[in-house]
Amino acid sequence: MRRLHVDLGERGYDIIIDRGMIARGGIAEYLSSPGGKTAVITDENVDKYYGNAVTSALRGTAAKLVLPAGEATKSFETLQTVYEFLFDFQITRSDLIIALGGGVIGDLTGFAAATALRGVPYVQIPTSLLAQTDSSVGGKTAVNTARGKNLVGAFYQPRAALIDTDCLKTLDDRTFADGMAEVIKYGCIRDEKLFDDLARGEIAEHMDDIVTRCCDVKRAVVEGDEFDTGERMILNFGHTLGHAVENYYNYQKYTHGEAVAVGMYNISLAGERIGVTPRGTAEKIKRVLTKYRLPYALDVDAAALRGAMALDKKSTGGGVNIILLDRIGHAVIRNMPKNEVFQ
Ligand code: GLY
């Protein structure tokens, strides 16, 4: 078992990485008040594997809401279903909500927890690699709107993130690769040794270690900039381009991680062009992306991408805040005109 503490004062919490904790029935030992009411929110894929193991490990009264799997669930319509479930269960602010699933369930449940009764405590139990290394830590919660993804949300920190890396065994290859893009991102922005390990080695036996290293980078960045006004933007390396690519294809062609992979490679080429990123960096990134079955080539023209990023949250009046690498393992933020980013 590994434990990291996200030090945000009274909003601080632990990230527990404990392989096998769900099957062992060990969830309750990490909950600070396991005796009250607990509302578990999950999706039908995750429920099949872990729903009963989690609910039966809880002490006190538990209720479970199983939602359809997929991005369409992160909607206002489903949010309404979540609120009704919570209020029918007569949830109070001294009870607990558990988000059991990947990024969609984590973001939606987190937003419901932030807003129901103006805030009910919640715990993240992330089951995908992307959620274990990124979205379950740091308190970003959201729902999508017709104008774009994650445009409505709140910063609302969980009481804990409980990570069981055994969950990774039930992911299909594409979903695993989706999360690997974020893992590679952490190597690029903050952990050269992680990047080298990914480039060199077999990772299957070391996932606890890898997830812990990613969470530790995220912990440090979030501690320094909880509300995403400065340094936290480095977590978006590859994301501005990636979001534009995802948006251009209406979220159908690429997974988030695949689009971020394309973004990391191509923004590194742009960084090399303007002399911030050392020559050869994009090529190193390409090799690692390919190793983990991720794409790198950009198949959308620049003008279309400029349009597709109109609502990116990193946009400012004059340009866009872009994350570049000045070396592998170190990221910098540059405000650049859109036409320099998309050439
Ligand atoms: N996923 C980026 C962040 O949490 O800031």
Image (cartoon, helix red, strand yellow):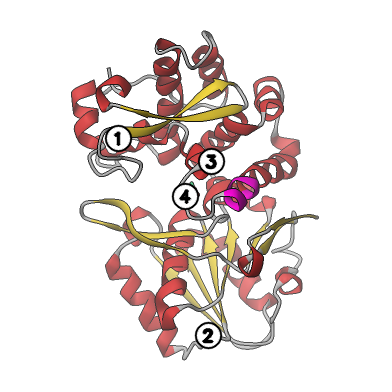
Question: What's the distance in space between the residues labelled 1 and 4, CA to CA?
Answer: 20 Å
| First along the sequence among labels 3 and 2 | 2
Dot 4 amino acid type: Asp
Residue 321 in picture, x, y percent from top left: 38, 34
Chief secondary structure of the magenta portion: helix
Mark 4 is surrounded, within 10 Å at the Cα level, by few (under 14), some (14 to 19) or many (20 or more) other residues, namely some
Q: What residue is rendered at 53% in x and 85% in y?
A: 93
Which numbered circle lies on residue 127? none
Q: What residue would you read off at disc 2?
A: 93
Q: What residue is rendered at 69% in x and 30% in y?
A: 194
Question: What's the distance in space between the residues labelled 3 and 1, CA to CA?
Answer: 19 Å
Q: Nearer the viewer, mark 4 or mark 3?
A: 4
Which numbered circle lies on residue 228? 4
Looking at the rendering, the stretch of residues picked out in magenta corresponds to 219-224
Q: Nearer the viewer, mark 2 or mark 4?
A: 4
The answer to whether 152 is drawn above or below residue 53 in the figure is above
Tags 2 and 4 touching, CB below 8 Å:
no
Q: What residue is rendered at 60% in x and 72% in y?
A: 52
Q: What residue would you read off at disc 3?
A: 179
Question: What's the distance in space between the residues labelled 2 and 4, CA to CA?
Answer: 27 Å
Q: Nearer the viewer, mark 3 or mark 2?
A: 2
Q: Which element type, helix, strand or loop, lies under badge 3?
A: helix
Question: What's the distance in space between the residues labelled 2 and 1, CA to CA?
Answer: 38 Å
Q: Which element type, helix, strand or loop, lies under badge 4?
A: loop
Quarter of the image where the N terminus is located: bottom right
The answer to whether mark 4 is within 8 Å of ligand 1 is yes
Residue 100 in picture, x, y percent from top left: 55, 64
Residue 130: in sight, yes or no?
yes
Which numbered circle lies on residue 244? 1
Dot 1 amino acid type: Ala
Dot 3 amino acid type: Gly
